Amino acid sequence: MKYEGNIYRPPSEAHSLLIQVTVSCSHNRCTFCNAYKGVKFRIKSREEILEDIIEAGQYSLHHPIKKIFLCDGDALIIPQKRLVEILEQIREHIRGVERVGVFGNVKSILRKSVDELKALKELGLGIVYLGVETGNDDLLQATHKGTTYEKTVEAGRRIKAAGINLSAMILLGIGGVEKSVPYALDTARILTDIDPDYVGALTLMVYPGTPLYDEYKAGRFVLPDTFDFLGELGVIFSNSNFTNCFFTSNHASNYLPIRARMPQDKEMTLAMIQRVIREADKKKLRPEYLRAF
Ligand code: SF4
């Protein structure tokens, strides 16, 4: 398999085969994100992708591959015809595949109709990871996320309408100290409106080279402290409602890993988060040196 640049995948794709179908992210403008900074976006050529699929196919003859994740930042941006072809080639060459996953941003999802998404589902696309980050429109604008509350809800619902599992990722701390409360309340509201199958919470880390880092160094953006991040998680937990959702914070950026089946685990998990905040014992949290984005 050939990989170019930095490769990212969600924690739940740790055991998936990673096939890189694009390099970088077509948006690449979010002020907090250093994932693909300076890397020009491109969709890999037919030949490059097919070569990797055939190589994986050879391996799968002896070791069936259950899960595949298509990298990089937003594989869903690939035009429908080409994406159909890639999924068909995976089906043709690789044995045992039960699920293909991708990152998809709001723009890439809204470029596809429900019927087109259903066609991708038929070919094995089983989960889309959508970077919601927050439901607060001011913050979506300030971080150059390139979307709004309304469009994000529409994108999330479109994935669900196609029968594809939806994992919504949120970013604790993106409002800084100043917008911590609106961040948490609006994020709870948008999660309730989307009602995803999974929520993955990440905790903001400010990296040099990003516009947010410059704001931070200039003192215009103040990071919440460790327990304020957990306070945001608690507010989101208590104010959001789900039909059937698995809510996790097991990404390496988080201080407190949680795994909760919602709504049934809501009260118990909320009580645990509140207890950790009350006790304010950093020894019970992931140490700073083990955090990574
Ligand atoms: S957060 Fe996602 S959409 Fe924004 S630049 Fe990074 S990879 Fe692209």
Image (cartoon, rainbow, N blue to C red):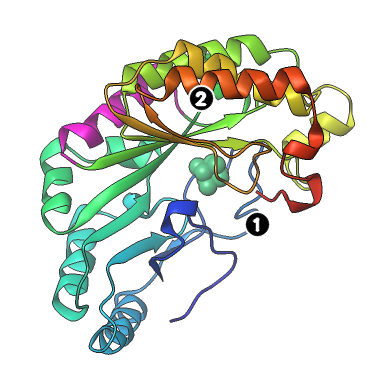
Residue 198 on image: x %, y %:
37, 36
Secondary structure character of the magenta stretch overall: helix
- Look at 24% across and 51% down and name the residue there: 126
On-image quarter of the N terminus: bottom left
Depicted 25 relative to depicted 210: above or below: below
> Residue 70 is drawn in which quadrant?
bottom left
- Find out whether residue 158 is within the magenta segment: yes
Q: CA distance from mark 1 to mark 2?
A: 40 Å
Which kind of residue does numbered mark 2 sit on?
Thr
Q: Is residue 138 visible?
A: no
Ranked by sequence position, the earlier of labels 1 and 2 is 1
Depicted 228 relative to depicted 46: above or below: above
- 30 displayed left or right of 187: right
- Look at 76% across and 29% down and name the residue there: 226
Q: What segment is highlighted magenta in the picture?
A: 147-163
- Look at 53% across and 58% down and name the residue there: 8
- 78 displayed left or right of 41: left
Which residue bears the numbered disc 1?
38
- The 10 Å Cα crowd at callout 2, few under 14, some 14 to 19, many 20 or more, is some
> Residue 97 is drawn in which quadrant?
bottom left
25 or 282, which is in the foreground?
282
- Look at 59% across and 24% down and name the residue there: 272
Which kind of residue does numbered mark 1 sit on?
Gly
Depicted 92 relative to depicted 81: above or below: below
165 or 280, which is in the foreground?
280
239 or 209, which is in the foreground?
239
62 or 94, which is in the foreground?
62
Which residue bears the numbered disc 2?
269
